[in-house]
Image: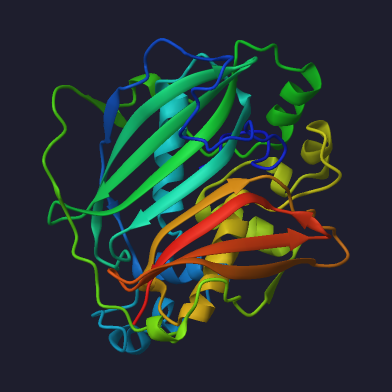
Amino acid sequence: MAGIMGSEQTMTAPETDAPAMESPGIAATESPAGRRFLVRDPYHVGREKVREFARAVQNSHGAHHSDADAHRLGFERLIAPPTFSSVIGMAATNALLDSVLLEYDLAQVLQTDQTFELRRPFLPGDAIRTQVIIESIRTFGDNDFICVRAEMTDQHDEIVQVASTTIVARRGAEIDPDLAKMVQNIFMHSRPATDLADSGVLIALDGESPVTRKAALPRVHTIPAFADLAEGDRLPTGTARLTRGDLVNYAGVAGDPNPIHFSEEAAQLVGLPTVVAHGMLTMGLTADYLTSWLGDPAAIETFSVRFSGFVPVEVHAPAVIDFSGKIKALHPERRAATVMLGATSQGRKLFGRAIADVRLS
């Protein structure tokens, strides 16, 4: 859930875990921290949207494309990839920036952390209601670290997934004239020229949060069995390739209009060597790497990443990303494992931390 300009990878948070920002030099700001909003309209999950997102993040498991493959995992119809909620969450975060967090310069908003908590995959036909909570706003130097939580509930009032993100925003900064001109000439005008603060996309909520129950965890059908794993085991390595066309396709499918992912001029104005891949695209590719080992996308319970590097994508050759993984811990009481994940491109680490909790057969 990135903002309008700036890359998820061009600036990183201090070297502490994002939710715990109580170190010296960081102070809480005034409201809107603690405020809650409901996205006015539900998001209706569509079959073809699931398929096109799976193609965009190269999630090749058959259950994302075929009902028959999803049936073998116990689902009635095909299932969305693990990071599909980024589509829903990005729209919610952009609505916050457009109508609530108006004091921030949208040209200098970027993402540092992302966590998904998955109860079950999204299914075609789901009508997803999203409640957005501004959990905290902490100041570090000239930047505010804004932690936003999106709780996604289905038509049965069950929490299906929760997405938490940390974005970094600079308040009241003067916009570079060259950057402003670039935005005018290149930026995708995806919103009507109306006052979004009065559009009613978000509904402010008062009082107690409504009581909801979590969706039941589905049974998993993984290739690795819990009994066959040991702490320290390494996953097979993997690779993925990205072209400029992949970046443009993901931008459209995910609704991310940031021109640093398709414009050389925009990328160089913010100090990047060339066009770079979306952080959430690299996270989606990492989810496919993990799923390929598991054999069941629904086995991923949590997936968390801190972005620290970027993937430059040149015009003449695809970028190559190398993946690795290691079993950090086993949890016999839940037949689960904690997996540390790694991703590099051109020898550069993409994540300061990437970790997933998975359930096993």
Q: Nearer the viewer, residue 280 or 353?
A: 353
Please report the residue visible at 50 percent of the width from the left and 27 percent of the height from the top: 21
Q: Is residue 6 above or below residue 174?
A: below
Say whether residue 295 is left or right of residue 321: left
Please report the residue visible at 72 percent of the width from the left and 38 percent of the height from the top: 10
Percent across and percent down for residue 232 are 57, 71
Percent across and percent down for residue 250 are 59, 58
Q: Nearer the viewer, residue 297 or 138?
A: 138
Say whether residue 220 is left or right of residue 329: left
The reply to whether residue 194 is in sight is no
Percent across and percent down for residue 255 are 52, 48
Q: Is residue 135 above or below residue 177?
A: below
Q: Is residue 66 above or below residue 301?
A: below
The quadrant of the picture occupied by the C terminus is bottom left
Q: Nearer the viewer, residue 175 or 283?
A: 283
Percent across and percent down for residue 283 are 57, 57
Image quarter of residue 332? bottom left
The reply to whether residue 135 is in sight is yes
Q: Nearer the viewer, residue 287 or 7?
A: 287
Please report the residue visible at 67 percent of the width from the left and 57 percent of the height from the top: 247
**Count of numbered circles on the image:** 0
Q: Is residue 322 above or below residue 181?
A: below
Say whether residue 113 is left or right of residue 19: right
Say whether residue 186 is left or right of residue 305: right
